[in-house]
Amino acid sequence: MSLEQILKKISKINLPYFTKDTSELKYFLNYNGSNGYLFITNSNPSFIFFTDARYYEEYSNILGKEYVFLLENGVYPVLKEKINTFNFQSIYIDYRLFTYKEYLDLKKNIKPIIIRDVKDNIWKIRKHKSKEELELIKKAVNITEETMIYLLSILKEGVSEKEIAIEAEYYIKIKGGELSFKPIVLFGPRTSYPHGESNFDTKLKNKSVVLIDIGAKYKNYCADMTRTVFFGNELDEDFKKFYNILLDIQKKAIEKIENTLKGCDLDNFVRDLLKDFGLEKFFVHSLGHGVGIDVHEPPLLSYKRKDDIISKNMVFTIEPGIYIPSKYGIRIEDMIYIDDKFKTEILTTFPKELLKIW
């Protein structure tokens, strides 16, 4: 990201603003270190990045020495000095990103400066993806889909969930990505656990449902995709029926996006369709979530969130699921982009029609 792009982003928030949040440091500065603090001002310089000797030289070269300050004895004394230099009477932070102890430490060390809550101002910016961000997300999607192809090609009787999950991590990394989240690979009745933990004990058997939920991260931007397939020489007819019901509902949900403003309405639409088949009680999570720097970020498409609006330049998932205890689970997850004209683009192109692997 160029300095011009950084300045454009930080100009839209309540100032002055102080953050230590890993995701925000990635968003504003592409910073991937383990000790960094960002103080965004409304003066000159427009921001100051505090870090230690491990990262100082690298980020001085990236951002410019006038924007980077070397930490030697903690950030708060230096922060107060900078606040006084700018003659600020108050600063903003996001209360949700600080523990209570961290808040008290900050308050004590910068007293009498007033601390205000920025609320969800930064999330409002992050929800809307730039063209550059979208391209990075598409690259992450490409790596994710290549990985899915590879994983399905190595399914065989006797392989464990954990072995396939490890292969997912390995393949994503050799393709130039990182993990958006720990891969979820589940076999048989364990697919009814929406976010089950892959293990070495569960081996793949003939006539088993396989659920794979994976996501690559590319240059700090995430992807997220789930596919459910059938492994075996003879397809289970009940599974086939439920799979095709869910697939039809997922497609209808995507078609309805362009005529929907609230995420809760889209979620309720899916639940009503599931109710027609007596399956609504098996849908136990939200319909979708935003994806970007974090794999789970606003908007949340849930009947519980009345205020989350679907709007232009957002990227989010559509992932209805049904989870029948002790039997199997089915989830079909795609990533969606809403363009400048409020048209829907499905970013994940991996086939969704029921696959039987043997």
Image: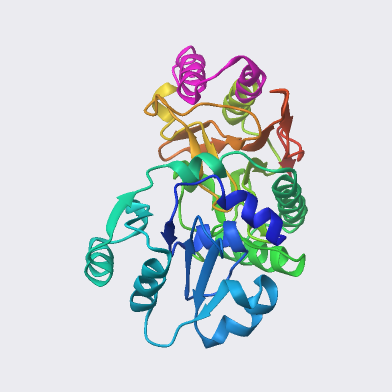
Q: Is residue 155 visible?
A: no
Q: Residue 234 appears in which quarter of the rendering?
A: top right
Q: Does the magenta stretch include residue 254?
A: yes
Viewed as shown, does residue 101 lie left or right of 147? left
Report the residue at 57% width, 49% height from top: 11
Q: Does the magenta stretch include residue 328?
A: no
* Residue 204 at x, y percent in the picture: 60, 55
* Residue 34 at x, y percent in the picture: 49, 75
27, above or below 106, in the image: above
Report the residue at 44% width, 17% height from top: 278
What is the chief secondary structure element of the magenta stretch?
A: helix
Of residue 45 and residue 291, the one placed in the foreground of this image is 45
* Residue 53 at x, y percent in the picture: 53, 87
Report the residue at 40% width, 37% height from top: 325
Q: Is residue 147 visible?
A: yes
Magenta span: 250-279
Where is the N terminus found, in terms of image quarters?
bottom right
* Residue 299 at x, y percent in the picture: 50, 36
Q: How many labels were placed on the picture? A: 0
51, above or below 272, in the image: below
115, above or below 121, in the image: below
